[in-house]
Amino acid sequence: MTGLIVGVESTAHTLSIGFVDEEGKLFSSESALFKPEEGGIHPREAADHHSVVAPALISSLLAREDFNQDDIVAVSFSQGPGLGPCLRIGASVARSLSSYWKSPLIGVNHCVAHIEVGRNQTGCEDPVLLYASGGNTQVIARSGDRYRVIGETLDIGIGNMLDKFARNHGIPFPGGPAVEKLSKKWIESSVNNPELLALPYGVHGTDLAFSGLLTSAILHSKKLPLEQVCYSLQEHAFSSCIEVAERAMAHTGKSELLLGGGVACNGRLREMSSIMCEERGGQSFWPEKQYCIDNGTMIAELGRREFQSGRTTELDNSAIDPTLRTDSSTIAWT
Ligand code: AMP
Ligand code: MG
């Protein structure tokens, strides 16, 4: 058994602790999801949730047969981007574990972790990443020692848009899976010939926008079947992401598309990415669902990459950075 790197994730709704070994074998995370009783995610309430569940998650981790504290070589955590109060809890948990286990601390970039866990799981080498999550929607590709943002949402994240639409109909967080189910119902009830509503389509060069689409979908759903609106909402939102991803592949000359983030669990988004890649002679990839949604294992995997490149974080430099950008972090590995 090689050494273990532990990763702590706490950027938004989920506190999660996972680990990898030094050779890059991934182990499932111990996770707890904050579900607000009503409304959206209030950062302070989510942070309170994380601090309450942290001891139980650590106990579950310690009780696992595949985990041995004596093997730990480093502890990594999401330093940003994310909700400040939530990030602070994860950073405190990581600092405590690092000090208790006398192993180095490594603050990592959450967005980059989605890429690295995807590369590890799927074997793709130099992909364009379509990062579609609750708060983030970006199309990213590596150039030199950075992952560059080629395009991104100009307003809200695609997952937040789906969650807000669902919430408007009394469907609790996370709304994305419910929108997917309702959309499938529309396809089935239309004997696979579903009628598509024309909704706003927010592609601006390589950037995206979802708030106009959201408003229009909410207005339509007052008069038309919810299933039809969900179907049309998904078709428009996902097509816009795939269009920008294809543009990024064309401009960079890369032939791999990797999906990441919670919305990458969606079957229709996966299908669209396969069709687009096949049509241009490329290949599409996505990690298992447990590694699409926010998880500690992906933070551990990026921690491993950083650790093996010789980077650790001194306590004085371990403050969180809620507005950290994907392209702020140097990538020292291939
Ligand atoms: P993340 O922020 O990466 O953990 O992802 C959470 C987001 O993923 C939430 O906005 C969810 O609604 C969304 N999500 C999860 N599963 C699905 C799905 N099957 N289809 C669409 N969105 C999803
Ligand atoms: Mg995420």
Image: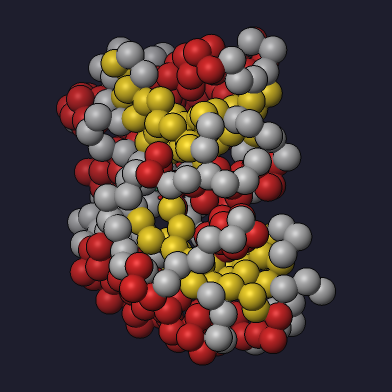
**Quarter holding residue 128:** top right
* Residue 154 appears in the picture as rendered: yes
Q: Nearer the viewer, residue 215 or 83?
A: 83
Quadrant of the snapshot with the N terminus: bottom right
Give the residue drawn at x 53%, y 61%.
Answer: 311
- Looking at the image, residue 230 sits to the left or right of residue 56; the answer is left
Q: Nearer the viewer, residue 261 or 317?
A: 317
Give the residue drawn at x 27%, y 26%.
Answer: 209
Residue furthest to the front in view is 310
User: Looking at the picture, does residue 201 appear above or below residue 55?
Assistant: above
Q: Residue 154 appears at what percent x and percent y?
A: 25, 29
Q: Nearer the viewer, residue 309 or 243?
A: 309
- Looking at the image, residue 265 sits to the left or right of residue 14; the answer is right
Q: Residue 200 appears at what percent x and percent y?
A: 26, 17
User: Looking at the picture, does residue 63 appear above or below residue 157?
Assistant: below
**Quarter holding residue 298:** bottom right
Q: Residue 9 appears at what percent x and percent y?
A: 45, 64
Q: Residue 169 appears at what percent x and percent y?
A: 26, 44
Q: Nearer the viewer, residue 304 or 81?
A: 304
**Quarter holding residue 79:** bottom left
* Residue 25 appears in the picture as rendered: no
Give the residue drawn at x 25%, y 62%.
Answer: 84
- Looking at the image, residue 181 sits to the left or right of residue 318; the answer is right
Q: How many marks?
A: 0
Quadrant of the snapshot with the C terminus: top right
